[in-house]
Image (tube, grey):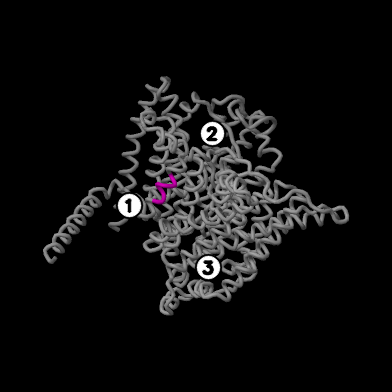
């Protein structure tokens, strides 16, 4: 029983990290129909930003997690730059396939650029403790503070984001653009601004996810975002891509699958099960758990 | 009737030119074979070029002609590599051959490569049937997932995977046993990759020109229209996928021969090295989606660039900042890919196929087109 509860806690923690990253994927996909492969690497950018700003923050005398503010700013800037420099020109001239290949290229570029930069390099860097260590134990099961913080922070961020898309002017504009670009233009929405804003928010979320991830595994390396990003993307597809509650659900499912496979089967098979779940869901319900099947118009 | 005779003439001409090139090559190889340059650099490079050419051309069938992005091509290659390696080890342990010479070994070698291809094709079929129900982005991600699952499963097999082929460590195990080749045998068996590449390319060209090729191009251009015209789209898609996986498997077997060490991390979605699913996509995009000759040229170019970045003497003369970038060749490829996609999304060749028999016609067409463009520009200037 204690194994079960432990696995559940780990799964929820992993799941909320995946959900945060998946939100970024889903928002960008919803608005421009592009799998932003570089999204996982934004986490890496956020991770390194925190590594370099933590000493600064400590010197001022603020708590460690304040460095996430810098990370959010840098990530948002990188996300917007990517959209403006790489995606927008290709979107104007190319097809969906060329856009996807560009996204892969941007991802490769970010990873390898980080390795080539002399102050980063290919070796992993160790981050300092972000959340306070320790925890409390309930009937033989130890709950770490990190787990609690991760779950609570993600829940808050998700609720805020959902309210943002539902109630604010900008959020409504985003939903409009993802539904019908031309109609949105006619309604006086600046489509390009909205897209850039979406990139900023999605990339900012990946920085928050990076904070949680480093809180758990205090190691930052250039390819840290690859598997994390892929799994988060799987989560987004699983829940129904383009749908914000779907991303949250998918993230939690993927996190739970991974932690239960690790606990009960084998840790090296966890990735296989994650992708297997994706394949099964896509075959049974191609639009994802919460997605609606839209027929193709001729 | 006239068309048919042109095709026949084309095959004849190609065969004749190839025969001449091969004779010249093999006489050169026979005279140079034992000396350093050829043995140490050229022969291993040819092996690598051959499997890269097969890989990029086979992915082009799916990416360029069928119009579906597959990100798991290295998974099929991994299957071919491991299947061939394990089979050859098993054959040696059963006592079918003892050292790497003689007709029996050649038979075992070719058999291993063929079986590797067939096995990869079967897995391609298994993957293709569910995967190709999806389209576009979803297909990309599901093939990526399958590629990862394949590599992960190989990793967890007790007789393959991280603990090496058979007993002991993976490193160097294929040099002594099985089908791994050292530099000397690479020269002796240089005809194997060349023959296989020629055969594979011929098969792919014939596929593209056949009714199958026309059908999948129709699917690429408009799937709904194609299916309305009576093309069984799912059959053609799955068939092309398996056909492409067959060649990827053979390329994997060649990879196992050439490298003599296998590690599952070389077949991942991305890694630091030259070989991964993304790199194959880079080659196809660079050469031109929908041009097999373009893929061949791009594979050779990418190989030469990769080789020069790592080993060229001119690299030492460059400023250290550039050398720092060259230490991460994938960074260079990423930039190349972005630039190609932005400024020439069709790749080097576009959908143009280089052909000997139509060389004159294509050249004249090109000149006429260029002249027409020039005239148009001039006209525009006059009007302005």
- State the CA–CA distance, disc 3 to disc 2: 46 Å
Element type at marker 3?
helix
Mark linked to residue B7? 1
- State the CA–CA distance, disc 2 to disc 1: 35 Å
**Between A119 and B330, the one nearer to me in the picture:** A119
Please report, as a chain letter, where disc 1 is located. Answer: B
Q: Residues within 10 Å of mark 1 (few under 14, many from 20)?
A: few
| Residue at mark 3 | A30
Q: Are marks 2 and 1 on the same chain?
A: yes
Which residue shows up at 60% across the image and 28% down it?
B172
Q: Where residue A294 appears, x then y in whole percent?
A: 55, 74
Q: Is residue B119 visible?
A: no
Q: Residues within 10 Å of mark 2 (few under 14, many from 20)?
A: many
Q: Earlier in the sequence, mark 2 or mark 1?
A: 1
Which residue shows up at 58% across the image and 60% down it?
A205
Q: Residue furthest right?
A: A139
Q: Where residue B84 appears, x then y in whole percent?
A: 59, 38
**Between B228 and B94, the one nearer to me in the picture:** B228
Q: Residue furthest bottom?
A: A187
Residue A212 horizontal side relative to residue B268, left or right: right
Which residue shows up at 63% across the image and 51% down it?
A62
| Residue at mark 2 | B257
**Between B156 and B167, the one nearer to me in the picture:** B156
């Amino acid at each position: 029983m204690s194994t079960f509860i432990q696995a559940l806690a780990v799964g929820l923690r992993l799941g909320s990290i995946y959900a945060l990253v998946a939100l970024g994927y889903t928002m960008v996909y919803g608005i421009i129909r592009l799998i932003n492969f570089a999204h996982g690497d934004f986490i890496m950018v956020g991770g390194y930003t925190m590594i370099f700003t933590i000493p600064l923050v400590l010197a001022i005398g603020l708590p460690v997690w304040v460095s996430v503010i810098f990370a959010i700013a840098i990530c948002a800037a990188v996300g917007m730059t990517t959209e403006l420099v790489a995606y927008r020109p290709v979107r104007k001239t190319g097809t969906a396939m060329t856009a996807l290949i560009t996204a892969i290229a941007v991802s490769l570029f970010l990873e390898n650029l980080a390795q080539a930069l002399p102050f980063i390099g290919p070796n992993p860097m160790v981050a300092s403790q972000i959340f306070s260590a320790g925890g409390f134990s309930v009937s033989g099961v130890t709950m770490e503070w990190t787990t609690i913080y991760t779950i609570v922070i993600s829940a808050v961020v998700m609720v805020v984001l959902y309210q943002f898309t539902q109630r604010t002017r900008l959020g409504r504009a985003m939903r409009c653009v993802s539904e019908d670009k031309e109609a949105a233009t006619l309604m006086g929405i600046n489509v390009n601004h909205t897209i850039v804003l979406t990139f900023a928010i999605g990339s900012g979320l990946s920085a928050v996810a990076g904070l949680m991830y480093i809180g758990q595994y205090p190691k930052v390396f250039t390819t840290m975002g690859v598997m994390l990003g892929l799994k988060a993307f799987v989560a987004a597809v699983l829940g129904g891509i383009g749908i914000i509650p779907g991303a949250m659900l998918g993230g939690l499912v993927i996190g739970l699958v991974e932690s239960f496979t690790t606990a009960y089967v084998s840790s090296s098979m966890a990735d296989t099960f994650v992708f297997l779940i994706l394949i099964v869901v896509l075959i049974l319900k191609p639009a994802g758990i919460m997605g609606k099947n839209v027929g193709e118009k001729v | 009737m006239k068309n048919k005779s042109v095709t026949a003439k084309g095959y004849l001409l190609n065969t004749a030119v190839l025969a001449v090139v091969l004779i010249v090559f093999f006489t050169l190889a026979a005279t140079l074979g034992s000396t350093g340059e050829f043995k140490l650099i050229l022969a291993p490079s040819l092996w690598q070029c051959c499997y890269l050419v097969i890989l990029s051309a086979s992915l082009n069938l799916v990416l360029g002609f069928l119009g579906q992005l597959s990100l798991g091509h290295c998974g099929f290659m991994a299957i071919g590599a491991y299947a061939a390696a394990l089979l050859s080890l098993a054959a040696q342990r059963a006592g079918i051959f003892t050292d790497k010479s003689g007709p029996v070994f050649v038979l075992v070698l070719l058999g291993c490569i063929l079986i590797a291809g067939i096995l990869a094709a079967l897995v391609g079929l298994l993957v293709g049937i569910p995967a190709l129900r999806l389209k576009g982005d979803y297909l990309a991600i599901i093939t990526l997932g399958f590629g990862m699952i394949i590599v992960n499963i190989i990793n967890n097999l007790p007789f393959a995977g991280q603990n090496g082929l058979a007993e002991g460590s993976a490193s160097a195990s294929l040099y002594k046993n099985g089908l791994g080749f050292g530099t000397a045998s690479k020269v002796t068996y240089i005809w194997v990759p060349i023959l296989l590449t020629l055969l594979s390319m011929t098969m792919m060209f014939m596929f593209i020109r056949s009714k199958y090729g026309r059908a999948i191009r129709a699917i690429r251009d408009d799937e709904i229209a194609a299916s309305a015209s009576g093309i069984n789209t799912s059959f053609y898609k799955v068939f092309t996928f398996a056909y492409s996986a067959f060649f990827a498997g053979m390329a994997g077997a060649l990879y196992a021969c050439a490298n003599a060490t296998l590690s599952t991390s070389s077949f991942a979605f991305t890694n630091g090295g030259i070989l991964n699913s993304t790199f194959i996509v880079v080659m196809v995009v660079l050469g031109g989606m929908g041009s097999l000759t373009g893929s061949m040229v791009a594979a050779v170019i990418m190989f030469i660039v990769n080789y020069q970045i790592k080993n060229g003497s001119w690299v030492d003369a460059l400023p250290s900042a550039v050398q720092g970038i060259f230490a991460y060749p994938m960074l260079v490829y990423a930039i190349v890919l972005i630039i190609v996609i932005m400024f020439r999304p069709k790749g080097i060749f576009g959908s143009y196929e280089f052909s000997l028999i139509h060389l004159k016609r294509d050249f004249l067409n090109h000149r006429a087109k260029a002249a027409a463009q020039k005239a148009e520009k001039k006209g525009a200037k006059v009007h302005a």
